[in-house]
């Protein structure tokens, strides 16, 4: 079983956030972000030994960890962003099996040489990009050099929700992951569909949270003058926080082979949508292996 999307903050990475005094930073176990209420990070949820035992007990052959893009690290000035990104890479690369990682990069001033070097590491699945960095077709031009390097490596890009500014509103706790995150993924998928594929014809890309269910709107897209004529064999969708109905609906549009397991642990748990043994095998093992190592479907 391969889990394509989890979060785990090793102690040294937490110390990096604690060493800062501007967003994002931590004081004790409290995380502070601009425009959001302080949030407690439960250290037990990021206990490396406990998580390793959990993953091995679930027979995970690989668990891919990602830097939390909602922290906004990829948008900081390079002098501020790079030390945090470097800390994340160093910590994650030292983690034991079954952990691997998606690397991160500044989307303002990406260190292209560092990205190219890191992509050669066998523990690195590919590059994570915040959905907010590709929320419009024009944004793909800004990411062009970065995406070109990933395409040349043969590894995929993982599109993860990015920062959200709540302006201290009294939102319910579920609001951010259900409303802004989904909207970000939705927009990123349409931007990629409109401009990204033409610019990067062989880049594999995986959208978190079923791309905010964007492909399910293909009929409206066509009715309003857009195009959706075939399945893109280089695009994948991980299912974090979605279950049977959403996954079943996506299969009807993008096919069985495009859906991969992503749990978003510790914020959600890996689940089997219960669509039959063949699909379970595809979701948990076959499709993730194809995303990471395979040729186009």
Image (spheres, rainbow, N blue to C red):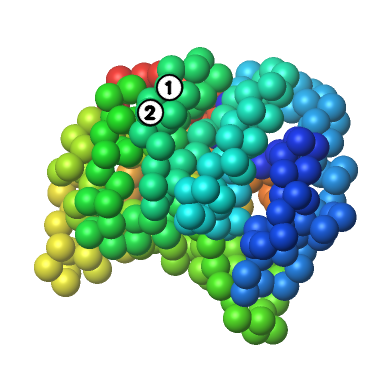
Could you say where residue 12 lies in the image, as x and y percent from the top left?
76, 36
Say if mark 1 contacts mark 2, CB within 8 Å. Answer: yes
Q: Which residue is mark 1?
A: 117
Could you say where residue 208 lies in the image, as x and y percent from the top left?
49, 47
Q: Is residue 24 visible?
A: yes
Closest to the observer, 280 or 132:
132
Around disc 1, counting alpha carbons within 10 Å, would you say few (fewer than 14), some (14 to 19), or many (20 or more)?
Answer: few
Quote the CA–CA distance across marks 1 and 2. 6 Å
Task: Please give left or right for residue 37 compared with residue 3 in the image.
Answer: right
Up/down of 270 relative to 245, above or below: above
Residue, far bottom: 169
Residue positioned 87% across, 43% down in the render: 44
Residue 111 figure quarter? top left
Element on which disc 2 rests? helix
Task: Please give left or right for residue 63 compared with residue 81 in the image.
Answer: right
Closest to the observer, 89 or 80:
80
Up/down of 185 relative to 102, above or below: below
Q: Is residue 279 visible?
A: no
Task: Please give left or right for residue 21 compared with residue 88 in the image.
Answer: right
Around disc 2, counting alpha carbons within 10 Å, would you say few (fewer than 14), some (14 to 19), or many (20 or more)?
Answer: few
Could you say where residue 94 lies in the image, as x and y percent from the top left?
69, 22
Disc number for residue 62: none
Element on which disc 1 rests? helix
Q: How many marks?
A: 2
Residue positioned 28% across, 62% down in the render: 136
Q: Assign the C terminus to one quadrant of the image.
A: top left
Q: Which residue is mark 2?
A: 113
Closest to the observer, 57 or 74:
74
Up/down of 57 relative to 213, above or below: above
Closest to the observer, 250 or 109:
109
Residue positioned 66% across, 72% down in the render: 36
């Amino acid at each position: 079983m391969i889990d394509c999307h989890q979060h785990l903050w090793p102690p040294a990475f937490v110390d990096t956030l604690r060493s800062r005094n501007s967003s994002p930073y931590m004081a004790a176990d409290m995380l502070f972000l601009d425009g959001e209420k302080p949030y407690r990070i439960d250290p037990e949820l990021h206990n490396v030994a406990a998580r390793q035992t959990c993953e091995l007990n679930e027979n995970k052959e690989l668990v891919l960890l990602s830097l939390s893009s909602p922290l906004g690290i990829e948008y900081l000035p390079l002098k501020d962003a790079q030390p945090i990104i470097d800390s994340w890479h160093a910590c994650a690369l030292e983690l034991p099996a079954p952990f691997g990682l998606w690397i991160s990069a500044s989307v303002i001033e990406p260190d292209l040489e560092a990205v190219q070097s890191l992509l050669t590491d066998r523990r690195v699945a590919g590059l994570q990009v915040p959905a907010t960095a590709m929320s419009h077709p024009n944004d793909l031009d800004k990411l062009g050099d970065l995406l070109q390097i990933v395409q040349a490596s043969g590894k995929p890009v993982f599109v993860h929700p990015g920062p959200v500014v709540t302006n201290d509103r009294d939102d319910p706790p579920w609001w951010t992951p259900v409303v802004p995150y989904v909207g970000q993924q939705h927009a990123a998928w349409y931007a990629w569909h409109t401009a990204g594929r033409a610019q990067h014809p062989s880049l594999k890309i995986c959208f978190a949270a079923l791309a905010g269910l964007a492909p399910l709107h293909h009929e409206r897209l066509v009715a309003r003058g857009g195009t959706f004529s075939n399945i893109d064999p280089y695009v994948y969708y991980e299912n974090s926080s979605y279950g049977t109905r959403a996954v079943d609906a996506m299969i009807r549009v993008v096919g069985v082979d495009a859906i991969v397991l992503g749990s978003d642990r510790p914020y959600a748990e890996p689940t089997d949508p219960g669509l039959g043994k063949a699909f379970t095998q595809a979701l948990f093992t076959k499709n993730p292996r194809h995303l990471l190592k395979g040729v186009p479907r």
